[in-house]
Image (cartoon, coloured by chain):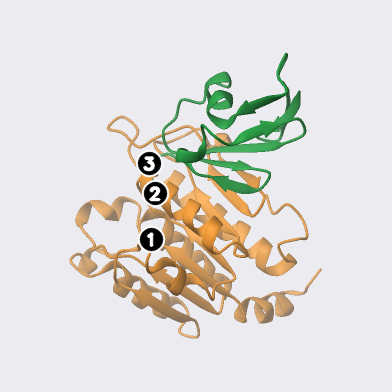
Chain colours: A orange, B green
Amino acid sequence: MPSFTEIKERLHTKSVGIAGAGGLGSNCAVALARSGVGKIIIADFDVIVESNLNRQYYFYDQIGQKKVIALKENIRRINPNISVEIFAERITLQNLTSIFSTCDLLIEAFDQADQKMMLIEFALINLPNIPIIAGSGMAGFGETNSLYVEKFDNLYICGDGATEVSDINPPLAPRIGIVANMQANVALDILLKGEKNGDHC
Amino acid sequence: MEITVNHISEVIENRTTITISELLRYKNFTYKMIIIKLNGNVVKREESDSIIVSHGDNVQVIHLMTGG
C-alpha cells in the first residue's frame, strides 16, 4: 500500500475530466482538488442561479457567474497548486472527445437523464480506454444505505438506481454530495490502483 | 439458453437466441433512458431489434435517471 506521501505524489500526476459543474460536478471537483489530483478539466455552459446553492459548491456572491469560472476560483482558494482547465460551453458530441481525450478518467456530472445517456454512450464508444464514473439516482433525502457503486466493465454507476428528481423528490445537498464524493472516491481508487486492479466499488 | 444480465445468470427456456428488444420486454425493462451493452460493446437503441443475444452472452442494461 502506498504511503500518504506516495498517494499525494501519484495523484499530482493525474488528470480527471468532469462533464458538468452542477451538484455532482462541483462537489466532486472540490473533493478531487482537496485530495490533490494534479489536473482537473471541467466543462459546463451554465450560469449560477440562487436555486443551485442548495447543493452546488458555489457561494451567494457568485450568483450570475459562469459555473466553471466560479469553480476554478473556489478550487484555487482551496489548493492553488492544482491546474484547472475550464470550458464554458455546452458539451456536444462534436467537442466531447477533444475536451476530455487526455484525461485518465471521466466523471459524468450532468443533470438530465437523456444528457447522461448521450454522454456515456458516446464516451464508451469514442473514448473506450477512459473509465467513466457516472451518477444515477440521488433525489430526495434519507435512505443513505440505498446508495452504492455498480461496475459495468469500465463504467461505474454511483447512486441508488431508483430515485428520479421530481417535486416530491427534490435534489438536496446531502444525497447529491454523497454521490459526488462516491464518484471522487471511485476515481481515487482507479487512479491509485490502476483500472485493472480491483473492482473499485 | 443461459446468459448473464446485469451480473446475474438468467436461463431463458425454449430459446437459442433472443434479440435485445425481446430481452428488454422479457425482463420488463421499460425505462427509456438506458445504456445497453452486449459483451462489453454498446448497443444503440436503433440496433436493438436486430442485435441477437446467444447462449453465454453478457448483457448489461444501465438505467439513467435525472438528478445531479
Label 3 residue SS? loop
The residue located at (68%, 44%) in the rendering is B39
Pinpoint the chain carrying mark 2: B
Looking at this view, is B29 or A173 the one in front?
B29
**Image location of residue A152, percent across then percent down:** 64, 46
Which residue corresponds to mark 2?
A: B68
| CB under 8 Å between discs 2 and 3 | yes
**Image location of residue A179, percent across then percent down:** 50, 49
Q: Looking at the rendered structure, which numbered label has been put on residue A20? A: 1
Label 1 crowd bin: few (<14), some (14–19), many (20+), radius 10 Å: many
The residues tagged by marks 2 and 3 sit, at their Cα atoms, a distance apart of: 7 Å
Label 2 residue SS? loop
Q: Residue furthest right?
A: A1
Label 3 crowd bin: few (<14), some (14–19), many (20+), radius 10 Å: many
Is A6 placed above or below B56 here?
below
Amino acid type of the residue tagged 2 in the rendering: Gly
| CB under 8 Å between discs 1 and 3 | no
Which residue corresponds to mark 3?
A: B66
On the question of residue B63 being in view, the answer is no
The residues tagged by marks 2 and 1 sit, at their Cα atoms, a distance apart of: 9 Å
Quarter of the image for residue A23 reads bottom left
The residues tagged by marks 1 and 3 sit, at their Cα atoms, a distance apart of: 13 Å
Q: Are callouts 1 and 3 both on one chain?
A: no
| CB under 8 Å between discs 2 and 1 | yes
